[in-house]
Amino acid sequence: MADKKISELDSQTGAQTADDDVFVIADVSANVTKKITLSELDNALAARDFNFGDNTKLLMGDSNDLEIFHNASDSIINDAGTGSLKLQTGGSTKLEVTSGGVTVTGSVTGSLTGNADTATQVFVTDPDPDTDANHFILGVASTSSGNKAVVLDGGVYFNPSLNRLYSNSIFISGSPTSNGFVGFEGATSDSFETFLYANDPTADRAIYLPDASGTLTVTGASQNVSFGTLTADGGISVDNITIDGTEIDLSSGDLTLDVAGDIILDAEDNGKVQLHDGGTYYGLLRRDNNDFQLYSIVQDGDMVFRGNDGGSNVTALTLDMSAAGAATFNDAVGIGMAPDSAVKLSVSGAVGPTNGSAGSPTHTFYGDPDTGMFRAAANTLAFSTGGTERMRIKSTGDAGIGTGGDFTYDDITGSGAGLVIGSSSVSSAGIAIRTGTSGTSRIYFADNSGSADARKAGSIEFDHSTDDMTIQAEDDLRLYAKEDVVMRGGTYTFDNADGSSEYARIDSSGNVLVGTTSNNSANAGHGFQPDGFVYHTRDGGAMLRLNRLTSDGDIQQFQKDGNTIGTIGSNTTSGQSLLDIASEADAASNMRFLTSSGSSLSEAMRIDSNGAVTKPLQPAFQVTKNAHQSNLAVNTNHTITFETEIFDQNGDFASNTFTAPVTGRYQLSFHIYLDNVDTATSYYEVQLVTSNTTYFFPFSANSLSQDATFWHVSSSILADMDASDTALMKITLSSGGTAQTDINQVSRFTGFLAC
């Protein structure tokens, strides 16, 4: 039945007695009520089981705090409230489950039977084995059997009074990486530990810890003991030591190997005997096949042989490894003979070096390996400096200096030259004739005819006292070259025959000067500068004369990049000689005239290809109003305002005023249009006001038959103005009117520089 309720009745119902507890079962939907006593309900429940399906819960408490159910796999008792789940006996809690864990009050007893493999096992899990505070503590009371607090299978037991673990044997399995080890905690927790573990050996091994005699015995096939560092202050006594990849280190003192026979260092298979210092590998002894090697390992580390000479330590021989093993002996060396103390090298027999080369001569000098003598060819000696051949002596006795072995200049005389200096393969060559600082060096060109002076037909002479060079010839001195003749130096002068007068010079800056010795226009003469600038200076008379003979044509041309852009020439028309100035830049060329403001150039005038003349900087302006100027007051002088610039050629008009940029005569014009001219006003007066003069233009209004709706006044003047003078327009209304006159916005004010 749906919507059924069971409730306990506080009062009796029907025929029930006072001793009966009565329950009412109500079917609300059917509006049916049935009654049952407690004894009847007990009898009904005692004869039946209660069957709850999966996940069907038995709920207890006002808020369903206790749940009992089965979820198809597990049976669950859940305290869903805020308290604990408790198991009690005699009103005392023995087991309490809280959100933090399980609390057991009293002892937990049980029977663990079987052997080590089959016994009932109890597992305790440490949630955080790295933290001491969370370790699981198992406490077991001591027994009377040897204080064995914990006994495992009879073979392992713990003695709490001695804090020791006893066993006949302990077997540890695993690798170091899988926790197969015995660890010893140091005095500082979790800071310093000692671990014992075993890698996979090649066979069973046994280690016997020291007995009462202090002996450490290792047994096994190889009987090996490995140490990172072995410290034995009392010494080590062994019959045989085999060291494989390890070290013997002494913290102090010396290591002495004292044997009755030989000391043998045996490194098999071409192995090395290494020498170290402070851990640094610096040398080795080794056998390489049948060779014995003494090897310096350190980069560029020398091999040094030292000994005792009469009580003094000396270095007898040094092999420089930074120089491919170059040998340095301390004193004289003898080859095939005893050394001669007077020389450093004594050789018995011939020394047969290689031929060598200019860059590596066979006979050279200390610290200068590319300077010396070498064999250039059979029966030919050559000498080099700085790695370049400078001189060669041939088998014929001919010598060449700076020839590089090239004797092709032998045929200059047809019979050969005994001395050749330089060749086509060298960059420079020469002969030096040297004297004292006040002497004179000379080269004479002579023949065998006439007197001694006559035979000296030419000479080259240098005076060391004046540093002057003189080239002299009895007749002409000619300079000949297939191409250019180049002269370099300071100033070149061109004098008359006896040297008394200078005609021209080329100074050290490349200026060609004629009739003057200074490169400036302050002195009379002519100058041609290397940058193309030409000047002519003269006091009196014409500066430059360009004379065209007979026919007309160009007298001077002006070019750019080789193209003519303008000319000045002569033209005869109707018997009259004219000067033509033409711009010929293109078919429709213009001619411009520029002026300077001090910092830049500006176009002042242009003549175009049609002959029209324009002057871009010519002052000119035209201004007008942008609105009526209304209700002019009577008996008041009003400035006429012009707010709009139609044009202002040179930017000279501002604030209703024109300012003359240069002194001149200016054409000024105005057209003033008036609205509402009042006939009651005796007169109107328009004024053109300049800094020098005021120009008046009055007219009578009362001569009009009626008030004029529209009236205009126009005029112009040629005003004489200085630079910075101003010009503006004004108007005055005399007395009598009603002051309603306006200046119409079509009024204009214009002006320009006439001359």
Image: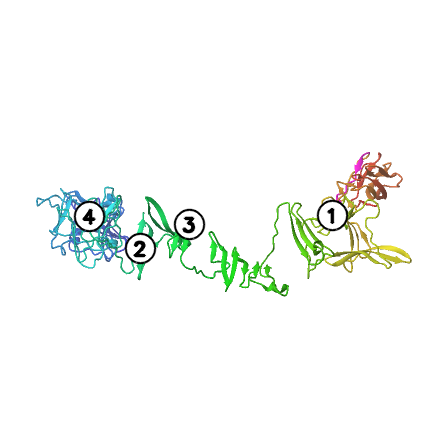
From the viewer's perspective, tell me whether residue 31 is left or right of residue 483: left
Image coords of residue 328 (percent x, y): 40, 51
Residue, disc 4: 236
Q: Is residue 512 visible?
A: no
Residue 641 within the magenta-colored segment of the rendering: yes
**Residue found at the far right of this picture:** 575
Q: Give the color scheme: rainbow, by chain, secondary structure or one colour.
A: rainbow
Residue, disc 3: 342
Q: Do residues under tags 1 and 4 come within 8 Å of each other at their CB atoms? A: no
Image coords of residue 4 (percent x, y): 26, 52
Q: Earlier in the sequence, mark 1 or mark 4?
A: 4
Question: Which residue is nearer to you in this view: 158 or 547?
Answer: 547
Residue, disc 2: 285
Image coords of residue 149 (percent x, y): 12, 45
Please, what secondary structure does the residue beneath circle 2 have? strand
Residue, disc 1: 601
Q: Nearer the viewer, mark 3 or mark 2?
A: 3
Magenta residue span: 635-645
**Residue found at the far left of this picture:** 144
Q: Do residues under tags 2 and 1 come within 8 Å of each other at their CB atoms? A: no
Q: Nearer the viewer, mark 4 or mark 2?
A: 2
Q: Do residues under tags 1 and 3 come within 8 Å of each other at their CB atoms? A: no
